Amino acid sequence: MTGPTTNIPPPEDIVGPIAATGLAGFFGKFTVLKGAQRELWLTFLIKFLIYTAYSVTNKTMVLWLSKDLGFNDQAAGALVGWVWAPAMTVFTLLAGSLTDAIGLRRTFFLGVGICTVARSVMVMTTSPSLALACGVLPLAVGEALGTPVLLAATRRYSTTAQRSMSFSVIYVVMNIGYIAAGYIFDYVRQWNLHVSFFGLEPTTHQQLFLVSLAFEILLFPAIYFLRRSADGSISSEPNRAASPFWSRISHTVRQSAVDTLRLFHRLLGQSGFYRLLVFFLFIGFLKAIFLQMDYVFPKFGDRELGLHAPVGRLSAINSILIILLVPIIGALTQRFSAYRMVVIGGVICAAGVFIMALPTGWFQPAVNSAPGQWLGHSYLGVSGSIHPYYVMAALYLAVFSIGEAFYSPRVYEYAAAIAPPGQEASYGALAYLPFLVGKLLIGAAGWLLAAFCPEQGPRNSGMMWLIFALAASVAPIGLLALRRYIRVPEAGRPDVD
């Protein structure tokens, strides 16, 4: 896109989609990306490739740790929930400053390069120590570099008029990646191929990592075609441009740690900060239920539904419904406070999990119905009889998705709405905390699997799901019971609704 160099945006950049009204204005919101620059479309492609590779890896991780590396349920759960996932969250918090220091394009290449090496190690080795030290931990670093970079790239490559729709597309692309990963996960496991590459005979789980590696390699040409000017303003700073690349990274890591400590020191003196921490602590219980779809469902499915059960396509129900429901529910509930919507969404999410704790016999009539047969045979591709857990899981995920569409987008809105003026970014950065809490909670899931859904021996999976449901209930109950102490007036909202 060429033209005179000026800092004044074109009129459509200022007015955006509000310039048109009625039906034309409605459709204009969807066509605003028609003239988007190439880099924005490349960002969407990069988002899809990154999240598909990440989701395939995430679904495979616990099975690989147990089946290939020999860790029991408890150790596998602890490694995923207390090492891999939290490390990714911590490094994500540092990645934003790193991007500012070395530029978008370099950060993309650095993250993808680290992930490529780490995934290669995970494909080739069955040594637990080597796989963890040179595979899992570096992969957490590489994956963490992608999240804030993608957000920064979306903002940089979109105009003011395109920005809102661009972030909506990014959200949709992420869920499309999750859907694709679910299908890939099921198909690779069901094919159960026995192949050999130069003497290497990868297991089914290593084949899944190999698919992730293929997506990772596809990222290199996509990033290459980003303009070099995407590296931002560092080239205009001679003192920094002249300094060695790794020296800038080292300096940035140190500075990020200092800035983070300063941030928390400043926030510790604000009462709203402590209220927000308690709020996020409760939201973490809902995030734990979301995370169990990757860290519990694969083993549960293999043990209760049969080896290589199509749990990937089951979990894809969540992403499909989220894509459809979030814009609709968001539009219908705009006038209600974020806190209220989070509570309503939490109640719905917790109610959905209780479905999995009910006796399976209650759902046999649903299995024999036309929708039950379509779900099992047409959508999931199950041959023979259909286990009631398939119908139960579909219902649970449908209800949970409705609740998630209510609460998840409003969590970030609440953090921004209660932030003191000028500190919106600081409070928004804390929105990573619920996922960290959820990951720490899900680390205990291995003990529940071993106790109630073991690979061998009698099972009582209903009790395991009851514990998950009670854990999810902590969120809405806590937010309701302590709302007088937690809730902070939201900017632009009435105190009570």
Image (cartoon, rainbow, N blue to C red):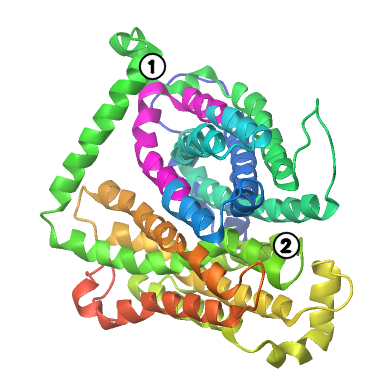
Q: Find residue 246 and name its label.
A: 1
Please name the amino acid that badge 1 sits on: Trp
The range drawn in magenta is 84-113
- Whether residue 83 sits left or right of residue 456 in the image: it is left
User: Which badge, 1 or 2, is on the more N-terminal residue?
Assistant: 1
Give the answer, above or below, for where 477 lies relative to 406: below
**Residue nearer the viewer, 406 or 167:** 406
Q: Residue at 37%, 52% (x, y): give it.
A: 432
Q: Is residue 35 visible?
A: no
Within 10 Å of the Cα at label 2, are there few (<14), some (14-19), or many (20+) other Cα atoms? many
- Which x, y percent locates residue 304? 70, 73
- The quarter of the displayed image where residue 243 is located: top left
At x 49% / y 41%, what residue is drawn?
12
173 vs 76, nearest the viewer:
76
Q: In this view, does 489 lie above or below 172?
A: below
Q: Spatial distance from mark 1 to mark 2, Cα to Cα? A: 42 Å
Q: Residue 170: horizontal and vertical position, in percent? A: 56, 47
* Relative vertical location of residue 57 with respect to residue 235 in this rendering, above or below: below
**CB-based contact (under 8 Å), mark 1 and mark 2:** no
